[in-house]
Amino acid sequence: MSNTLPPLPAIRHFRRIDAGSNMARFYMLSLEPTLFGDVAVFRHWGRIGTRGRQVATFHASMAEAQAMLERQVARRRRRGYRES
């Protein structure tokens, strides 16, 4: 199995905006290859207009990384985020 990036978008952007509760959040997921042959899943989140926070997890295969990305996408959708 190769560690090439999939043909689907490697970056996914989400937003959750609720004016009634003063909520304006963003969430971004990206898949990127590393110099050592692993695949990194970067998660970047925070309030819209701020720098936010970022965390990276490293996976030995593209399949593992895609599974992690899809779990995070499902979690964001359950919490009311919409893809932008």
Image: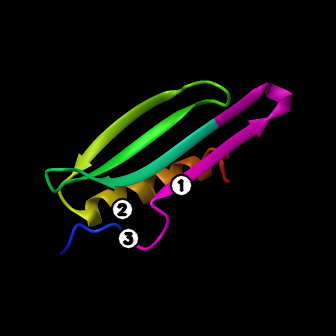
Q: Which residue is mark 1?
A: 12
Q: Secondary structure at mark 1?
A: strand
Q: Is residue 13 magenta?
A: yes
Give the residue type at disc 3: Pro
Query: Residues under labels 1 and 2: Cα distance?
Result: 12 Å
Residue numbers of the magenta segment: 7-25
**Along the horizontal axis of the image, is 36 left or right of 15?**
left
Of callouts 1 and 2, which one flags the residue occurring earlier in the amino acid sequence? 1
Query: Residues under labels 3 and 1: Cα distance?
Result: 13 Å
Q: Which residue is mark 2?
A: 66
Q: Residues within 10 Å of mark 3 (few under 14, many from 20)?
A: few
Give the x, y percent position of residue 30: 43, 51
Q: Which residue is mark 3?
A: 6
Residue at the spot 31% in from the left edge and 57% down from the top edge:
65
Give the residue type at disc 2: Gln
Give the residue type at disc 1: Arg
Give whichever of 10, 66 is nearer the camera: 10
Give whichever of 79, 27 is nearer the camera: 27
Query: Residues under labels 2 and 3: Cα distance?
Result: 9 Å
Residue 54, compared with residue 35, is above or below; it is above
Give the x, y percent position of residue 44: 48, 37
Of callouts 3 and 1, which one flags the residue occurring earlier in the amino acid sequence? 3
**Along the horizontal axis of the image, is 48 left or right of 71?**
right
Residue at the spot 37% in from the left edge and 34% down from the top edge:
55
Of callouts 2 and 3, which one flags the residue occurring earlier in the amino acid sequence? 3
Q: Secondary structure at mark 3?
A: loop
Q: Is residue 59 magenta?
A: no
